[in-house]
Amino acid sequence: MASAREAGTFEGNPVQLLENLSTIKARHAALCTQVEEIAVEQKRSMDSLRAHLDTTVQMVQQLQNTADVQVPPLTEEEQEARDVLCSSVAALNVEAVLTEEPQTQAQSESQNVREEVPEGTFETVPQSVRGNLKLNDLNTLYKQLSEYFSDKNRGPISTQRMKKLNMKVSDSALKTLQHLKLIELDKKGLVSLLAKD
């Protein structure tokens, strides 16, 4: 032991090392418990933030719809702030996303992307309904409506509101989409997008 001390390779009493090891294990267990508690609190905070953010977005959209006012596009600073907020929420929410049941790629594509009206289908619409409407104009409006109604909380939209949102709206396009059972027009002239089978 004396020669080991002199050489600097002496590591100490094995009993003392085992006691230190048990102390380290106890500290490790305590740290693991704290990390789990922090993760639970973090998830609770993120759920609360997400709920408040969703409520705020819905209130703003309701206000826009009832006031029939077009909101100007975001400035560069606002877009930057939105991107930072979204990336921060996404980074903090990775664990919650991983625990949710993942959708298949086909399911998510079918929910987010609507097909364009094919030329063959367009040709089946009587000339008296579509008039001199071009297929490209019809698909542009259909895409714009699909994007508008991608938010499930949005109600029917008026043609006046569509024009304010710079949608490529016309009577013949609306009648054609209604004929193809892609939209629904109520008695007040409000448009709703019909779910595709």
Image (cartoon, rainbow, N blue to C red):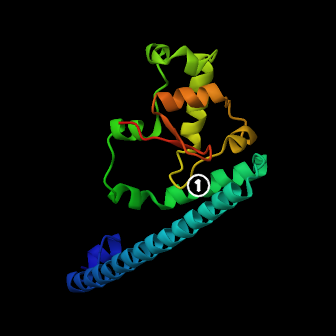
- Position of 48 with respect to 85 (left or right) is left
Which residue is located at x 50 percent, y 73 percent? Answer: 45
Q: Is residue 173 left or right of residue 38?
A: right
Q: Residue at x 46, y 60 (%)?
A: 93
Which residue is drawn at the image coordinates 29% and 75% (left, top)? 11
**Label 1 secondary element:** helix
Label 1: how many residues lie within 10 Å, few (<14), some (14-19) or many (20+)?
A: few
Residue 176, percent from left and from top: 54, 26
Q: Is residue 176 left or right of residue 43?
A: right
Q: Nearer the viewer, residue 93 or 157?
A: 157
Quadrant for residue 109, please give it: top left
Q: Position of residue 94 (x, y in %)?
A: 43, 57
Q: Is residue 29 above or below residue 196?
A: below
Q: Quadrant where the N terminus lies? A: bottom left
Image vertical order of residue 193 relative to residue 48, above or below: above
Residue 12: image location, x then y, percent: 28, 80
In the picture of the structure, the residue carrying the numbered disc 1 is 86
Q: In the rendered image, is residue 140 in sight?
A: no
Amino acid found under the numbered disc labelled 1: Cys
* Residue drawn at the location 33% of the way across and 46% of the way down: 103
4 or 50: which is nearer to us? 50
Q: Is residue 94 above or below residue 119?
A: below
**In this rendering, does residue 150 appear at all?**
yes
Q: Position of residue 128 (x, y in %)?
A: 57, 18
